[in-house]
Amino acid sequence: MKTIILATAALALGAGAAFADGHAKTIRMGTEGAYPPYNFLNDSGEVDGFEREVGDELCARAELTCEWVTNEWDSIIPNLTSGNYDTIIAGMSITDERDEVIDFTQNYIPPEESRYVALSEDADLGGVIASQTSTIQAGYIAESDATLLEFATADELIAAVKNGEADAVFFQGSFLEPIVANDPELMFVGEPVALGGGVGMGLRESDTELKDKFNAAITSMKEDGSLNTAIKKWFGDEATVFE
């Protein structure tokens, strides 16, 4: 089986950037630019982070010319489907609901736990819980007995707890861990919750050739261990990696 996977990857990667019309195409990589360490804008105003590093490597392995564009999270799927860019690479978890609208590559981050963060151990997790709009965490809270308080960006979540708007935050553990580690007022509370099928690249359902190219590139990064190396670099040695 391993030999078959590698052979398939090599075949797809060797196809290069020639699409059906016979011409190379610049692939526009859509990201939020406001979700460290997944993606953020550095001091030069350029897209940076784990997904910039991995995305550039995937484009190189697939022999694609790529450029990066940013888009606000709450409209990131509509702007993909309308053609403003060709992929979403923005910490987006693979879910059945999203898969009805767009297509996904295989995951480039394994499924991870979502966590609650609050100012005290006795925080009311059935009270007001802050999460980012249009995320699987927000959907989880919306279906619970708690009251969901949604924000457009992840950066606003911690502020909501600190100013008393929310009793706790519920979001991706890898995003919250460095924040908690560097803020003595914050702590993890409650039990972790496993959601989603990992993080993948979003594409239009019609872009099957592009999906195949990126899938082959992701497979090659998994096979040679470079994807796990990048995950540990950006998320720490304790991060969940591919076996």
Image: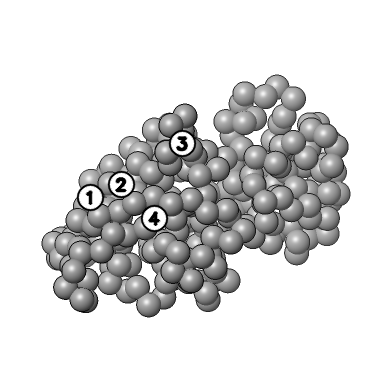
Residue 107 appears in which quarter of the rendering?
Answer: bottom left
Horizontal placement of 166 versus 156: left or right? right
Residue at (85%, 37%) from the top-left corner?
A: 164
Check disc 4 and report the residue beneath it.
Answer: 29
Is tag 3's residue or tag 2's residue first in the polypeptide sequence? Answer: 3
Residue 225 appears in which quarter of the rendering?
Answer: top left
Residue at (13%, 62%) from the top-left corner?
A: 14
Is tag 4's residue or tag 1's residue first in the polypeptide sequence? Answer: 4
The quarter of the picture where the N terminus appears is bottom left
In whole angstroms, how far apart are the C-alphas of marks 4 and 1? 13 Å
In whole angstroms, how far apart are the C-alphas of marks 4 and 2? 10 Å
Using a 10 Å C-alpha cutoff, classify the residue at mark 2 as few (fewer than 14 neighbours), some (14 to 19) or many (20 or more).
some
In whole angstroms, how far apart are the C-alphas of marks 3 and 2? 17 Å
Q: Are marks 1 and 2 in contact (CB under 8 Å)?
A: yes
- Which mark, by number, is residue 148? none
Is tag 3's residue or tag 4's residue first in the polypeptide sequence? Answer: 4
Using a 10 Å C-alpha cutoff, classify the residue at mark 4 as few (fewer than 14 neighbours), some (14 to 19) or many (20 or more).
many
- At label 1, which amino acid type do we have? Ala
- Give the percent coordinates (x, y) of residue 110: 44, 52
- Give the percent coordinates (x, y) of residue 59: 27, 53
- Give the percent coordinates (x, y) of residue 176: 61, 37
Is tag 3's residue or tag 1's residue first in the polypeptide sequence? Answer: 3
Residue sitting nearer the eye, 142 or 54: 54
Check disc 2 and report the residue beneath it.
Answer: 56
SS class of the residue under badge 2?
Answer: helix
In whole angstroms, how far apart are the C-alphas of marks 3 and 1? 22 Å
Q: Answer above or below: position of 22 versus 179.
A: below
Q: Answer above or below: position of 134 versus 230.
A: below
- Which mark, by number, is residue 60? 1
